[in-house]
Image (cartoon, grey):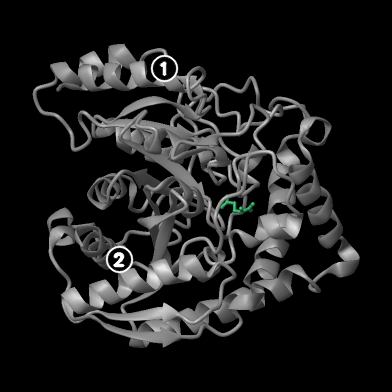
Amino acid sequence: MNAKQILKKYLSEIKKNDKSGKKINAFLQLNPNAIEEAKKIDSKKNKGKLAGKIIAVKANINVKGLNASCASKTLENYKSSYDASVIKKIKDEDGLIIGIANMDEFACGSSGETSVFGPVKNPQALDLISGGSSSGSVASVSADFCDMALGSDTGGSIRNPSSHCGVVGVKPTYSSVSRYGLIDLSMSLDQIGPIAKNVSDSALLLSVIQGKDEKDSISQDSAKLNLKEIEKFPKNIKVGILDLEIKDKRIQKLIEDKLSEASKNYNWKIEKIKIRNIDLAIGIYYLLIYVEFFSGTRRFDGRRYGKKIEDVVGPEVLRRILGGSEISKAEYHGRYYHLALKAKKLIEEEFAKAFEKFDCIISPTVPRLPHKIGEKISVEEMYGYDALTIPSNLAGNCAVSIPCGKIENVPVGMQIICDKFQDGKMLQIARSFEKL
Ligand code: GLN
């Protein structure tokens, strides 16, 4: 099939099940020029690496001419005037953007329920949350509305919904993918990354978007992903299994069973590993997020873009703005934010030590199953969803969530964390699990 045919197949699926039928609500906007763009791709002689791949983009990434609303009333009518660097790279390789995906408002959330345009349903379990904040990106892949998607991950927003919806979601090493054109949640943690139906496709998309970009001063070059290498089987792998009790023992067991299967089949060595201070991760994370998000949102004052943020946002975004404003008051200088940065460093060092001994660290992606859409859970419970994903954002490592099985018919993800700039090895290990 050519790009136009593939696109049409997906568009008809979207028509059937996004706003009607199953009412997944994954998309906020479809690309009105998609068919024209597909035709152009099909007529090219020399096609790029992503020709024929149909891609959804989270609503906090700028795609020229489309609406980067961040699923908020604040930017409801904001039309992007430029392409984010990742989008430019995708277009250069003939990837086709099918539309803009729903998300938690300003990426603040773990369930996909804080979007002002309504929650995203989990395509694998329709009455449950999809997870968040890259809810629409993940659901669009899981519902077979597209081949792949871009999300952003600050504390787990790619991996958490990928786990709940049964797809592969990658948080690349911090700074290895340009963030130019991302409307960020936290400058010291955010990372754009790929979501796909399998490891090979996510590696393909990552290979296109990674690399240094002069428009993002913190971005760095990493070893280019070798897609052939990822298909090969890694030898002598030493796996650390995270020694941390989670409440839902069924999830723990699923992961452990998968690991023993791998160790039997591949002769991998497995050992338990404790990461000190990991229990502080949520506290450290939210302190940093509140302050950095508050500071980042000062540009949404209603004069330059859209509406004044405080006037129109939902309770979770407001909580972070008010909390961040309080913590960053002059009289608290150095007391909280800088302390959190120091604690972040400690976690980073713990992981660095662990990776002297292990090739990867494995854990469940999310410590619990997703709740019912609309079910009231406490703020602490909501923040708890990310207990196992946040640590690698604090450390800056790469991490991936891959499907590991189901409990009560709900997908459960396994997380594989590797050292900084070991994204290739991580995907190779992930691919080996996929082959089991
Ligand atoms: N759920 C986390 C939060 O609400 C993570 C968000 C994200 O990774 N963008 O902050």
Q: Residue at x 40, y 66 (%)?
A: 254
In what quadrant of the picture does the N terminus appear?
top left
Q: Residue at x 17, y 72 (%)?
A: 234
Ligand 1 within 8 Å of disc 2? The answer is no
Residue 211 versus residue 266: which sits nearer the camera?
A: 266
Amino acid at pointer 1: Lys
Q: Residue at x 50, y 17 (%)?
A: 20
Q: Secondary structure at mark 1?
A: helix
Verify CB contact (< 8 Å) between mark 2 and mark 1.
no
Which is nearer the N-term, disc 2 or disc 1? Answer: 1
Amino acid at pointer 2: Met
Q: Which residue is mark 2?
A: 426
Counting from the top left corner in percent of width and height, residue 302 is at 77, 28
The image shows residue 321, relative to residue 239, as above or below, that is above
Q: Which residue is mark 1?
A: 16
In this view, which residue lies farthest toward the right? Answer: 331
Counting from the top left corner in percent of width and height, residue 282 is at 66, 67
